[in-house]
Image (spheres, grey):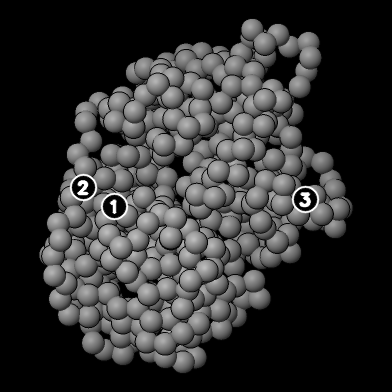
Amino acid sequence: MNDSVSTSSPRLALRGIVKRYPTVVANDGVDLAVGVGEIHALIGENGAGKSTLMKVAYGVTRPDSGTIEWEGRAVSITSPAEARRLGIGMVFQHFALFETLTVVENIALALDDRIDLDELSERIRAVSRRYGLPIEPERLTHSMSVGERQRVEIVRCLLQSPRLLIMDEPTSVLTPQAVMKLFETLRRLAAEGVSILYVSHKLDEIRALCDTATVLRGGKVVGTARPAEETNTSLARMMVGTDITECRLTPREPGEVRLELCELSRTSVDPFGTTLRAIDLQVRSGEIVGIAGVSGNGQKELLACLSGETPGVESGSLHICGQQADTLPVAARRELGLAFVPEERLGRGAVPPLSLAANALLTGARRGMVSNGFLRDDVARAFARDTIAAFNVKAGSELASAESLSGGNLQKFIVGREARLDPKVIIVSQPTWGVDVGAAQLIHQALIDLRDRGVAVLVVSEELDELFEICDRIAVLAQGRLSPAQPRAALTVDEIGVRMAGAGNA
């Protein structure tokens, strides 16, 4: 840190920032100041303008008007490279990693100085060990889960020793233990004078970690708060402008088995992947079963096996609605009544440049969007419009591209698209990753409504609070083995944590 900088001057001050897009004003005269050594939260609903404001601070986006001050002087941040030269680092919510490169190669590309890859690999290992974010430098990125990629982004940023660290949903797919370790690191950095601008929808985290919070709604600052003096309810009310209605899971007797795995085993073709070992699981009509676990313990492999992306098993069997489906491709499984929400929104859940209507067509052809081999654009557009309305998606129209939506709004659209296909079985991975509290409740209620209509629902999540809120039974995946699914009421968070560490699994 520059000793000549007065601690009375903010490290970063954004004044009157305005950023307009064709269909929305993302930032409307925003003021924000982050002090030296301060952990400052930026909170708001999906689409409130948080990510746009962070991109302005990091030089990714140029504001239409307003000024930026760095350590008391006006600056123009025209690129991420300029931001890094000032001492600003950023961990993005949506990852900027090349799929075909290794971890060390991806990180080397993001550094401004050239460095020997062997030396960089050792630095990566040291930083990842120090901060409790284990990653293997030689691993290919395409083989990694979302949680593992999140670790790469965080380690990449920490390697640059930033003076201001911007974190956009940094813990969205980290385990509770990894979150606590990260918080220790952030508090230590703040004590050393590093400023932290922290964007998150997890209000418990905000209250535990942050000194100050600025609240955005509709692109404008609507208030500030000291999170430690607030409750989750009061912060949520500031974010959305109304009280949040809690979901209610009414006990009910489940029906017939709709998804069944019997002694399913499969060796991972990825040398860094996880082999699935003798997995037994039943999901019945009218119940929600949750799978907890630390990212990288077989979730990716299990979901690919269930969805049909990688059909076939070495031993055991997979049945969907009573029919053996081990070798069936994706389309055939959907014909049996399977719907699927992957953890990666952009690229797998939706095609970024395509419109929402076109993305509805990708999985909704059975809903009358194709007739006699011809696409019915009017039906696809109507389906997309109805999904936007039913799930409160903030989008210009059904013709808006998927990539133009905020992460949370795109997640609501994808969940809504799959839920409205009248599935018999729906598999949802990380349903509320990077989603605000209001949108999370909407998604949770949608899953509960499906369950109450007799759909078999399987949820894979690293959010234990989420699983305890919406699931009838919970199992734990650790080292490729799945524990028996038990009633939620018979489990505690501590017991789940022990199993996530690999103890007690079958």
Dot 2 alpha-carbon crowd within 10 angstroms: few under 14, some 14 to 19, many 20 or more: some
**Residue hosting label 3:** 126
Quadrant housing residue 324: bottom left
Per the model, the C-alpha gap separating discs 1 and 3 is 37 Å
Dot 1 alpha-carbon crowd within 10 angstroms: few under 14, some 14 to 19, many 20 or more: some
Closer-to-camera residue (389/459): 459
The x, y position of residue 83, in whole percent, is 67, 29
What label does residue 181 carry, if any? none
Per the model, the C-alpha gap separating discs 2 and 3 is 43 Å
- Of mark 2 and mark 3, the one earlier in the sequence is 3
Name the residue located 23 percent from the left edge and 36 percent from the top edge.
Answer: 244
Say if residue 321 shows up in the picture: yes
**Residue hosting label 2:** 247
Closer-to-camera residue (478/401): 478
Residue type for callout 2: Cys
Per the model, the C-alpha gap separating discs 2 and 1 is 8 Å
The x, y position of residue 80, in whole percent, is 65, 34
**Residue hosting label 1:** 469
Closer-to-camera residue (442/20): 442
Q: Mark 2–mark 1 contact, CB under 8 Å?
A: yes
The x, y position of residue 68, in whole percent, is 58, 16
* Callout 2: SS: loop
Name the residue located 23 percent from the left edge and 87 percent from the top edge.
Answer: 322
Dot 3 alpha-carbon crowd within 10 angstroms: few under 14, some 14 to 19, many 20 or more: some
Residue type for callout 3: Ala
- Of mark 1 and mark 3, the one earlier in the sequence is 3
